[in-house]
Structures are given as C-alpha cells and as structure tokens.
Amino acid sequence: MAWDAQTYGSRWSEIYDGLPWPGPHQAVDFLAKLAEGGPALELAIGTGRIAVPLVERGVEVHGLDSSDEMIGKLREKEGGENIPVTKADISNFTVDQEFSLAFLVLNTIYALQSQEEQLSCFVSAAAALKPGGHFVVEAFMPDPTRFRRNSWTQVHDMGLDHVLIEADRHDPSTQQILEQHIHLKQGSVELFPAFLRYVWPSEMDLMARLAGMRLVERFGGWAGEPFNARSGNVVSVFRRDAS
C-alpha cells in the first residue's frame, strides 16, 4: 500500500486524541489574536484539537480534511458537529470565500510528499486569504543529525505486555523521513506509519514568496519564543500581499 493523502487518517484516527500532544491553549491564544475577528480556515482540521477550542473563543472556523475517519472523530465532539468542513486534499484546494487567517499545524505540511505538493498548498492557502490575511504554519525544526547512517530507532514505551518502538529512515537527498511506529502487544502487532518530507525555514519562505506571501514573523513556539539555532519547533507567520 502506497502513502497517499488519506493514509494518516485511516491509520491514526482511532488513537490520535490519546497521543501526548502539547495542550492547544497557547496555539489557540496565538491564532485567535491573529484572526482579528475574521473567519479562519484550518487546513487538515483532523479531530478538531485546535478548531474546537478556537470556536469556543468566538472565532468562526472552517476546515479542510481528506480523511473521513478524522472528520468523523471531529463530529463526535461537543461543538465539532457544527464546524463547516470540506473534504479536500490540502495540496490543491479552492474555497468559495475569503479568510482572514489560514493555518496548518503540528507538522502537517510535512505530510505532503513532494516540494511541488507543498508549494501548491501555499498557493491554495494564499488564494483563500483576503489581501493582508495571514497563513500560519507550525512544524518541528528538521534535525538530520539525529540519524546515524540515515536511520534512527527508539523505544518510546515498554511494559510487561507491550512495547512501542519508532523506526525511521532518512533520505537527505529528498528530505524525506519514513517513520513507522510499531506497537507490539501480547499476541498482536500494529503499525502506524508517518511518511514525511521536511522543509527548511528558508525553503518555506521561498514557497510563500512564489505564492504571493511574505514572512512577517517566526517563533520557536506558540508562546512567542525567539526562533534560533536551539529551537526544536518553528511557527511561521506569512502575510498575503495586498495586491
């Protein structure tokens, strides 16, 4: 089976909300302020980890997602049933209104498998924004030094009857990381893949410029931490050109 836009949702939706993600509060504060009262579009809305509390803050949120399973989990949540969601591939989409804010969080830009798809995502996001609107992208900072001979393995959890192992393969020539999260339980094996193409911040800035946007701010996290050589995370804020 090849990786495609639906793979992540179909494999991860049942366990996604139980994973140890950071709390959404700082991201929600950051995005609510940037929306400035206007409507917001979340690319890859998923289970609504950010969208639901953002709506509770009074922001009108619309969503895009390619996974029926993820959208179904969103619909099960209080408040999630009323968020407008369009089923679409975030690498190439159109919407029928303009937004003050579009955002793509938690490394999801890396789920697009090629530079062409990632650039197309930026172009689609820019087209969805009103002039002067903002596009926010959050992702981990690439760190090829973690790999030895372009591979990496770590035990994340272990007990009497289970072990959780992550095995990664890195191709620096294509900036791709093939992750496999292996859940071994007594009598069963479950595989949760995540195939990624990481993007350097400077490369992301060029994609934005080609799409008619400019970088206006970059942080090392949602709390506004300075972005520097020690940053493990990167939050980039782009603005659509006024004309």
Image (cartoon, helix red, strand yellow):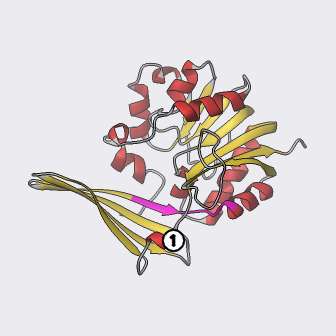
| Few, some or many residues within 10 Å of mark 1 (<14, 14–19, 20+) | some
Is the residue 59 above or below the residue 190 in the image? above
> In percent of the image, x 54 and y 57: which residue is there?
110
For residue 36, which quarter of the picture? top right
For residue 154, which quarter of the picture? bottom left
**How many numbered circles does the render carry?**
1
Q: Amino acid at mark 1?
A: Pro
> In percent of the image, x 40 and y 24: which residue is there?
77
Residue 239 among those drawn in magenta: no
- The magenta segment is 194-201
* Residue ranking furthest to the bottom: 149
Identify the secondary structure beneath mark 1: helix
Q: Is residue 119 left or right of residue 144?
A: right
Q: Quadrant of the N terminus?
A: bottom left
Residue 166: where, in percent of width, then height? 32, 61
Q: Nearer the viewer, residue 31 or 103?
A: 31
Q: Quadrant of the C terminus?
A: top right
> In percent of the image, x 63 and y 45: which residue is there?
225
* Residue ranking furthest to the right: 243
Q: Is residue 116 left or right of residue 185?
A: right
> In percent of the image, x 71 and y 32: which residue is there?
34
Q: Is residue 165 left or right of residue 162?
A: right
Is the residue 204 above or below the residue 124 in the image? below
Is the residue 116 above or below the residue 73 in the image? below
**On the image, numbered disc 1 is attached to which residue?**
144
Residue 51: where, in percent of width, then height? 54, 30
